[in-house]
Amino acid sequence: LLDPTVSHLQRNLTSLRRTAQGNRVLMHYNGHGVPRPSENGEIWCFNKNYTKYIPVSLYEIQNWMGMKDNATPMPGMYILDCSNAGRVIDSFGKFLRKRQKRGKPSDSTGFDRKVSLRHRSRHQPNAGEGANNSAKNSDPLRHHSSSGEKTNERYTGGNTQPSLRPRVEVEEEALFGDTYFLGACASDQSLCTNPTLPADLFSSCLLTPVKTALRWFIVRSQEARDLYCYSEEILEAIPSDNRPHHRSTLYGELNWVFTSIMDAIAFDVLPTDMFTRLYRQDALVASLFRNFLLAIRILRCLDLDPVSVPRMPAGIEHHRLWKAWDLIIDETLQKVQNSLHERRKVSLVR
């Protein structure tokens, strides 16, 4: 939707949810050229006369995207390419917590709630017993988070134990359920502009990762003034044959290599259950989270911290397999550049 009004957004989201039923719905918010999200995490749409922007609450978007019950959202995927993207995620979680506290819908009789409260008060221990039980049965997550060392360790794929993950991450994933977020930057950060890179750099990383990675490598080679400094005309010279994902083309082969390396990085740094859920169960989720690793690497070089739910561990941008990807890109660009030089020599001889 290009510059939608609030009613257009509501109508399209509810229509998508009605069509998808229980399947996942993707919402991609490109916030370039509009006000940044408010302090309450509201995003902006036009009014019906297109004369001013109106804030849209995440509570309304939750309703339009669908709720399984009063506190559990339907499967969804949110891409936030805007400044202060972390505010939107925080607001989404805040409204989910309010829904959970509110409990059942207001039109219920409340009989079940009274029974559960009466049962809870009957079996609730006194203050002394509660303190002793909490000390004896403390969660191992709390021990690791308080030490300050285990929570910062690099995850090691299948060897990672769930207890090594910080409590806040586990609780956040349980709160959001089958809803995932990818954001361009943290709640206190603003997107930067670079004339040599796409304005919507985060979206480019997610939607056209190989082409964005090639452009990023060329820009870095120009800034570093390497011996092999590549020009941007090489990108136009790479043949794609309008089939960027077919292995018979150069783009297609690079895409297959990119997929393999990103999966290897994800398997190495994520817990096994998290890797399986993100990269082996849903093709849409797997593709976006795979490309999100590239976004982390590029944007952190620009002093931005991409955010996600579930959260990615720190240090992904320094993984050793990025060197293999850089080597493949360097060899590819050298071959394309040599091919261009040969063509020019032939044309000059003629």
Image (cartoon, rainbow, N blue to C red):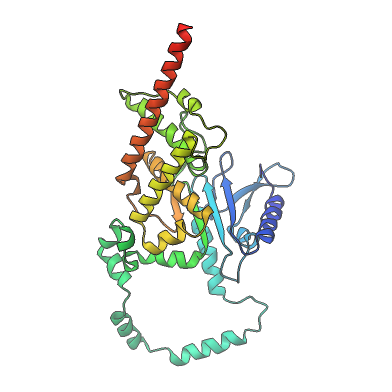
Q: Nearer the viewer, residue 350 or 196?
A: 350
Q: Residue furthest right?
A: 49
**Image position of 121 (left or right of 319):** right
The percent position of residue 245, horizontal first and vertical second, equals 52, 41
**Image position of 247 (left or right of 313):** right
Q: Residue at x 53, y 73 (%)?
A: 101
Tell me if residue 45 comes above or below residue 133 in the rendering. above
Tell me if residue 90 comes above or below residue 144 in the rendering. above
Q: Residue at x 67, y 51 (%)?
A: 9
The percent position of residue 153, horizontal first and vertical second, equals 28, 57
- From this viewpoint, is residue 172 visible? yes
Q: Nearer the viewer, residue 220 or 183?
A: 220
Q: Residue at x 36, y 86 (%)?
A: 127
**Image position of 317 (left or right of 290):** left
- From this viewpoint, is residue 305 visible? no
Q: Residue furthest bottom?
A: 122
The percent position of residue 29, horizontal first and vertical second, equals 57, 47
Tell me if residue 173 comes above or below residue 320 in the rendering. below
The percent position of residue 345, horizontal first and vertical second, equals 43, 12
**Image position of 154 (left or right of 100):** left
Q: Residue furthest front?
A: 248
Q: Residue at x 58, y 38 (%)?
A: 33
Q: Where does the N terminus fall, quadrant-wise?
A: top right
Q: Nearer the viewer, residue 19 or 146?
A: 19
Total numbered badges shown on the rendered structure? 0
Name which quarter of the figure residue 132 lies in. Answer: bottom left
